Image (tube, grey):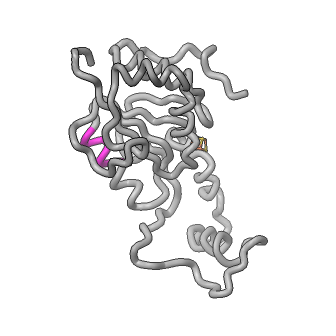
């Protein structure tokens, strides 16, 4: 990935908390230097909802908890040369995947939705119905890591990864010299 043109990055937040996108912005002044090398295409940061051109790097926050997440992730795979899973939700489902452990009944998804919308200790739902408007994306049987849905080329671990780690990884990737992390560069404190 070399050349005079600015390299294109696309980003998306699937089943995540947007914290990994906040970490992207947490590069602070490093972002100024990065913007001399890259431009953002489809991304919540640009508010562009579709790809205008193929991206060199696609950054995925979050795993897949509904069918819309799956379609968007597949669209990123089609439109990006390299896909990066950013943060633990994209890498292994993260916090949203805690619902995968709910399996007391024959219908764990129903059990999870009823706990979330009807019977949970802090729920005040006078309709006693789980929302089921047709415009809502179909909820999947469990939360899937991004790599369970499409091929992921690289992972940046953390919750959220530090702005410095994201910056250094992107710079290495864009220069074509990313060969994995020095384990000492990954910290979770
Ligand atoms: Fe949020 Fe952490 Fe998941 Fe990133 S990895 S989306 S910061 S919960």
Of the pair 166 and 188, the residue shown nearer to us: 166
In magenta segment, residue 93: no
Residue 106 position (above or below residue 80): below
Q: Quadrant of the C terminus?
A: top right
In magenta segment, residue 75: yes
Residue at (55, 38) in percent of width and height: 22
Residue 179 position (above or below residue 19): above
In the image, the segment drawn in magenta is 73-79
Residue 155 image position (x, y, % from top left): 47, 30
Which picture quadrant has residue 33? top left
Of the pair 146 and 188, the residue shown nearer to us: 188
Residue at (49, 57) in percent of width and height: 65
- Ligand 1, by image quadrant, is top right
Which picture quadrant has residue 38? top left
Question: Is residue 104 toward the left or the right of residue 146 in the image?
Answer: right
Residue 19 image position (x, y, % from top left): 58, 42
Residue sticking out furthest to the right: 121
Instruction: Please identify the dominant SS of the magenta region.
Output: helix
Residue at (38, 54) in percent of width and height: 70
Residue sticking out furthest to the bottom: 127
């Amino acid at each position: 990935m070399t050349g005079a043109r600015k390299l294109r990055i696309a980003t998306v937040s699937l089943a995540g908390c947007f914290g990994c996108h906040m970490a992207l912005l947490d590069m602070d002044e490093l972002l100024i230097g990065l913007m001399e090398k890259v431009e953002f295409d489809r991304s919540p940061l640009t508010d562009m909802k579709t790809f205008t051109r193929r991206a060199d790097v696609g950054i995925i926050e979050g795993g897949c908890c509904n069918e819309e997440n799956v379609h968007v992730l597949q669209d990123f795979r089609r439109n990006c040369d390299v896909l990066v899973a950013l943060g633990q939700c994209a890498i292994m489902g993260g916090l949203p995947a805690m619902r995968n452990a709910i399996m007391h009944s024959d219908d764990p998804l129903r059990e999870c939705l009823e706990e979330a919308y009807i019977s949970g200790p802090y729920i005040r739902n006078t309709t006693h119905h789980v929302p089921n408007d047709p415009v809502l994306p179909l909820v999947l049987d469990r939360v899937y890591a991004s790599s369970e849905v499409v091929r992921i080329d690289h992972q940046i671990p953390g919750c959220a990864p530090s702005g410095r780690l994201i910056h250094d990884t992107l710079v290495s990737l864009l220069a074509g010299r990313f060969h994995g992390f020095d384990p000492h560069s990954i910290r979770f404190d």
